[in-house]
Amino acid sequence: MSGLKSCVKKLAVANQTRKYKSALKTKNLDYNAWVIQLENNQKEDFLINDRNQKCLKNDFKNFLNESHSDKNDENLAKSIRLCQQIDFIYDENGENCQTQYLVCDPVLLPQVNQYVKKPDNSVDCVIFKISDGNLSKFALREISEIFHRNKNLIMIYSDEDVMLPNGKREKPWFKPDWAPDEFLSFFYFGGMVAVNASKLKKLQCSGSDDIYSYLYKLLLLEGAFRKHELYDRNLANDRVIHVPKILYHSFAPSYDVVRDMKLSSVIRERIGRAKVSVIIPSKDHPEILFRCIDSLIERTDTHDEFDYELIVVDNGSNEVNKTTIEGILNSYNATYIYEKSDFNFSYMCNLGASNASGDYLLFLNDDMEITEPDWMHKMLQKAALPYAGAVGAKLIYPDSDMIQHAGITNLRIGPAHKLQFLSDTEDHYFGRNRYVHDMMGVTGACLMVKRAVFDEAGGFDEDLKVAFNDVDLCYKIFEKGYYNIVRCDTRLYHHESLSRGNDSDSDDKMQRMNREKDYLYEKHQWIYGRDPFYNINLTTDMWEYEYAPKYHYEVHLERDWARVSEITDDIKMASEDRCVRIGMECAMDIFKWKYGVEKGRIDIPASDDDMGYYLQGYTFVTGSNNACFERTLFLENTASGRCYGVETESEFRPDIAGNVPDQLNVDLAGYTAKIRSDSLPKGHYRFGMYMKDRTSRLRLYNMSNWTLDIS
């Protein structure tokens, strides 16, 4: 009999696994299929009638052949053969607009510079192909339209992918908008760049110039390395324009070509004899504090270019610890500010700043550990730039190679630490953990800023006592026109959460964190869910640590409303078990999800489709075949104890599968739902997940710390 039961169980498991694999296939989209579907709605470039065909020119080729005397230079001869001069004509509002392009290899840079200065040439735009590849069939139209709309344009770059010999496309590179410090770090423009020919006429090309140094000199001449006054409320830049579309197909990854391109000299601000005030908030952890301070003193090289002072702000250590801290700091000639008060990180940092004498402020958590001698010097090099705002470093979890912080990205779901928990031994998404990057923010655990910029931004907001105070400061600095920068070319250890604990380990902390996030976006509503340094073709709607293309996962609120029904017996029969992992990522009023603030806070009327809540997260059962489980998200009314089940939709989550490679069939661990406001009685609810094994009598559930108020 037991043998029969075992056989039946195996058949049931196999059947459920087949169904799971079939469902996974429909969710796991292929990039090639996705991008083709996306581009089907775009108009292809076309050359208008025979008149335009006659406009195809060989002027530049003739110029090269006439001026080229070394016929044995095969590389140059090949480059000459590959160059092309094209007239492109398109209709804009019923009018013909013509742009003349010169498409060529960067090896021809000296000849291009000479040619565009000829008074009789009519080239509008020079397209340099940095890596071998082809322009997309939409490229000329996109570039032409941008050139005609933006008269001050310097250059255009775009997203790109790799085209295989069979025509299939893969490895998309979705890039940030103009990021000056990323450009100084490596040639992130990639395989193709289009340059305004009228700008090239102003610049002389020296014999030692390669395409990188030449474009750097052009950008410097045209004022691209300055505060972003050109960002308007649409976060649009009309000088260096990034097109978030695939306009170039490389034959091999262009990143392999450009990642090793370096500038012989990069823009530096004279530091002089600067002074850095290192401000460390701390309480009751002298052993942690002095590990931080000792590592700073022992491992920091000032290069005889700057000095630093130490300021420790203590908000109430006990008498024993206070005496210990004060005695050691006196021996270090450091400033000790003791003021007993409730924890308020913003107040402590502002208090330290008000007692600082430095030109630069460096806010440092007491659980940091210095590992590299150049760390402060590198941060100061960036902070000294006239356009620089807050500057941070890459932070690593101690005794590991795991990334804790590599800059803050502003997603719709909230400020996010991309690359967190991933190994720093790997090269992630085109060098996101390797170079210097412009970001919307950096963590206050290690943040340097000019004193003048800090004061201009108004310092830390003391209404944000615990969470998002560093994000708010960075957003205020960005709104003043400065670029926030993370140096992923230096790393420190961060012993995170040793002093205060995790924000998500209790209901009260979660509610407080959500209130502070709401306050953050009420202050900065215009940038809610928007980030010029994070491509719109990447996922913006989930806590995902990689830079995943959005075809993996994208929220569609046009879905049907989920069915909600009271459940009783099933939950009572189930066992509460922590092997049921439930991760809540969003439980938000739909209007707030769309606009970042509650109804009535902005001049946008709420529609009937806004009258509800959007729920999102992930769940799986550890040590089990997750293909066999039927799940039900439920909300428990904390006053009555009544539970209500919510019908959810499974979502493809390769990030979860990657984080738990030892777990079986968790690729569809994601879930989403949209529920109406009137589908539940008013009250305060906790979230839980009920898991029912379809192949046995096993019933499990677990509760989350996330809560939702239905009003």
Image (tube, rainbow, N blue to C red):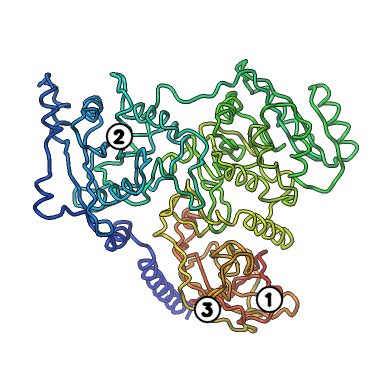
The residue that mark 3 highlights is 562
Question: Label 2's element?
Answer: helix
As measured in the structure, the alpha-carbon distance from the residue carrying label 3 to the one carrying label 2 is 57 Å
216 relative to 514 in the view: left or right: left
Q: Nearer the viewer, residue 564 or 145?
A: 145
Residue 549's quadrant in the figure?
bottom left
As measured in the structure, the alpha-carbon distance from the residue carrying label 2 to the one carrying label 1 is 60 Å
- Residue 216 in sight in this render: yes
Judge depth for marks 3 and 2 and give the one in front.
2
First of labels 3, 2 by sequence position: 2
Q: Position of residue 203 (x, y in %)?
A: 33, 26
Check whether the beta carbons of the residues at disc 3 and disc 2 lie within 8 A of each other. no
Q: Amino acid at mark 1?
A: Ser
The residue that mark 2 highlights is 198
Residue at the extreme top of the image, as rendered? 304
Residue at the extreme right of the image, as rendered? 319
Q: Amino acid at mark 3?
A: Ala
Q: Amino acid at mark 2?
A: Ser
Residue 177's quadrant in the figure?
top left
Q: Which mark is residue 711?
A: 1
Q: Residues within 10 Å of mark 2 (few under 14, many from 20)?
A: some
Rendered position, 525 above or below 371: below
Q: Residue at x 41, y 28 (%)?
A: 221
Question: Label 1's element?
Answer: loop
Q: Position of residue 341 (x, y in %)?
A: 85, 46
Q: Nearer the viewer, residue 215 or 283?
A: 215
Q: Position of residue 19 (x, y in %)?
A: 39, 73
First of labels 2, 1 by sequence position: 2
Q: Position of residue 605 (x, y in %)?
A: 57, 72
